[in-house]
Amino acid sequence: MGRVFRIFGIGFILLLLAGGALAYRTLNAAGYFGTVTSAFAGTCQAISGVVGAEDMELDRQTGELFISSQDRRPESGKPIAQGDIFLARIDHPEVSPQSLTLAMSWPLHPHGISLYADGNGKRTLAVVNHPERSAAERGISEVILFDVIEGAGKSPQLSLRRRINDPLIHDANDLTLVGHDSFYVTNDHGSESQLGKQLETWLMLPRANVVYFDGNAAKVVATGLNYANGINRSADLATIYVAETTGRTLDIFHRDTTSGALSPMRSLFLGAGPDNIDVDGEGNLWIAAHPKMLDFLAHAKDATKLSPTVVLKVDPAAEDGALRTIYSNTGAEVSGGSIAVSDGKRLVIGAVFEPKYLNCTLRR
């Protein structure tokens, strides 16, 4: 009997040690032990009127800023509100953003967006849409393609061209166009059940993936990712960048421009949970990240709880990424920042839940 108790005791101690190690790994990955201070060399102006500016796309030829907007905090007992795509100008923060989808009658609950322009000036805006209430939690996603129609002397309009549904596109988070009908999209979870998704997140199980849609069919081109989130491409379409939020890394893939296949090149550890990715005119990456992901989860449930935001600048041509922190805030100025877009003079920061976004000047 004594031997049995000793074996049981040893097993219990080992179980406690394993549990403690797992808890430490999770807390460390979530930034629990780190500290965040507010630091930025420029000045910021809050732009109201847009709720939940989770993602943005800048047309660097025109200065037009397309904004994905969704109020993710519905009043108790009420359905989630219709989302919207707004248009603003990065260089004119004094001009109020205007809705481009206000008249649409079908459910629009946008997530990630992507803009593609060809050499003739034709533009396509792609939108990840979760067409049902709380669909993002249930794994129901579609991709909508809009033609950006130019109006004589007027702001552009969006004309629905195509809605794409495919079983491989299920927990879609973000996407990047590589043509008017072809794109890469991230599924941030691989599990079907809510319990499975929770386990993926908390245990950091690498089950997320990237799917390529060539205009006709979809196929999985990257697997084994920890919460695949933001995605973008290089100007020559030969490189794809993917953010792994719970992995706190940026993955760089070589793209076969004929087949669409992705080959891993390297991963850069960022030290914070990256969200969306912007690629500037010089090829640098601007990444909004969550340095304290447990604070972000608390902020998602309670607007009064702050979630720090950092903006990272990465040079993908440098072997070490030449990582720089451009903006850091404890959450008082903007909580839960998810996208950072820069034209070299200004920096715009959007957030998942805030009823505003920031338009900041960059000090050279």
Image: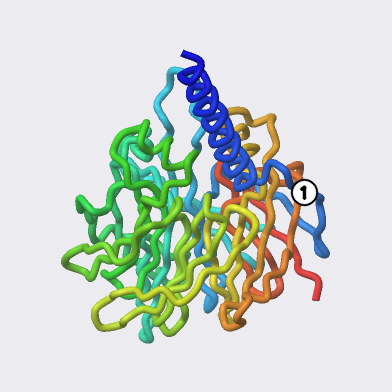
- Residue 64 appears in the rendering: no
Number of marks: 1
Q: Residue at x 35, y 36 (%)?
A: 196
Relative height, residue 18 to residue 114 (above, below): above
Element type where label 1 sits in the image: loop
In the rendered view of the protein, which quadrant contains the C terminus? bottom right
**Residue 211 picture location, percent across and down:** 30, 61
**Residue 112 picture location, percent across and down:** 43, 55
Q: Nearer the viewer, residue 346 or 261?
A: 261
- Residue 206 appears in the rendering: yes
Locate residue 315 relative to residue 201 in the image: left or right.
Answer: right
Looking at the rendered structure, the kind of residue marked 1 is Val
Locate residue 148 relative to residue 353 in the image: left or right.
Answer: left
Residue linked to disc 1: 36
Residue sitting at the far left? 216
Q: Quadrant of residue 282?
A: bottom right
